[in-house]
Image (cartoon, rainbow, N blue to C red):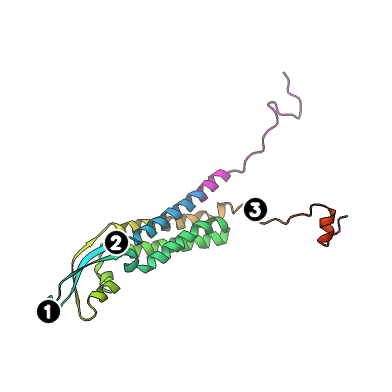
């Protein structure tokens, strides 16, 4: 059978999809989910105990003059800035979708910096928590004056977990910066539309000429 000139042999061809459109949307969705997961991991970890120890006052010569008290420190008390940085990363989940090229690049930079700061802060506490512990309100409440003696110090997985969340945010922010110009912006169908008059009378009441 000879095909009719000007007509495709197998029916009308469908309009081709934009090249890479699905891929860029998947990339954007993956970045949003990664940002959400990283921030959620950090926020979950800071609410848990990071460090435990026994605190007592000392005479300054190594002599303990009071019974030791067991103290637990959460991530929020040891590193309050980590919570604020995680909230910044959480806000990035919305900003990545709502912004366009330059704005999205700026969001990526902020998320990456927040992740790096979380990684350095939480990682430092995971490696050596003593410096962070000594200046806390919990220690001052037990030893309001003099040099505290802190013994039996132990760490949980909390600061390591926060470090992982910070690493996820840092990598996600870097990916957003690298790919910001290729990802689609929020669809125009979510923008507000002006309702048209139902009939001529509505148009007249609105001060419009129905003709």
Contact flag, marks 3 and 1 (Cβ < 8 Å) = no
Q: How far is mark 2 from mark 3, CA to CA?
A: 45 Å
Picture coordinates of residue 140 (x, y %)? 26, 76
Residue 188 image label: 3
Q: Which badge, 1 or 2, comes first in the chain's sequence?
A: 2
Q: How far is mark 3 from mark 1, CA to CA?
A: 71 Å
The residue shown at (28%, 66%) is 73
10 Å neighbourhood of mark 3: few (<14), some, or many (≥20)?
few
Q: Which badge, 2 or 3, comes first in the chain's sequence?
A: 2
Residue extent of the magenta highlight: 3-28
In the rendered image, residue 10 lying in the magenta stretch gets the answer yes
- Residue 20 appearing in the image: no
Q: Quadrant of residue 166?
A: bottom left
The residue shown at (59%, 53%) is 186
Residue indicated by mark 2: 49
Contact flag, marks 2 and 3 (Cβ < 8 Å) = no
17 and 78: which one is in front?
A: 78
In the rendered image, residue 51 lying in the magenta stretch gets the answer no
- Residue 16 appearing in the image: yes
* Number of numbered labels in the structure image: 3
Q: Is residue 189 left or right of residue 47?
A: right
The residue shown at (71%, 29%) is 8
Q: Is residue 132 left or right of residue 210?
A: left
Picture coordinates of residue 1 (x, y %)? 72, 18
The residue at the far bottom in this view is: 145
Residue indicated by mark 1: 61
């Amino acid at each position: 059978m000879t095909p009719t000139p000007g007509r495709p042999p197998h029916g009308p061809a469908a309009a081709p999809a934009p090249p890479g459109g699905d891929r860029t949307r998947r990339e954007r969705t993956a970045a949003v989910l990664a940002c959400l997961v990283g921030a959620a991991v950090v926020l979950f970890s800071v609410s848990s105990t990071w460090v435990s120890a026994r605190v007592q006052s000392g005479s300054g010569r190594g002599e303990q003059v009071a019974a030791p008290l067991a103290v637990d420190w959460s991530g929020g008390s040891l590193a309050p800035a980590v919570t604020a940085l995680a909230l910044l990363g959480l806000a990035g989940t919305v900003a990545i979708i709502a912004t366009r090229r330059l704005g999205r690049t700026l969001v990526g930079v902020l998320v990456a910096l927040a992740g790096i700061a979380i990684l350095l802060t939480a990682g430092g506490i995971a490696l050596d928590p003593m410096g962070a512990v000594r200046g806390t309100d919990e220690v001052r409440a037990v030893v309001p004056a003099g040099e505290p003696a802190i013994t039996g110090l132990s760490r949980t997985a909390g600061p390591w977990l926060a470090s992982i969340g910070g690493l996820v945010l840092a990598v996600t922010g870097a990916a957003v910066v690298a790919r910001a110009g290729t990802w689609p912006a929020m669809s125009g169908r979510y923008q507000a539309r002006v309702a048209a008059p139902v009939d001529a009378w509505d148009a007249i009441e609105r001060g419009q000429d129905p003709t």
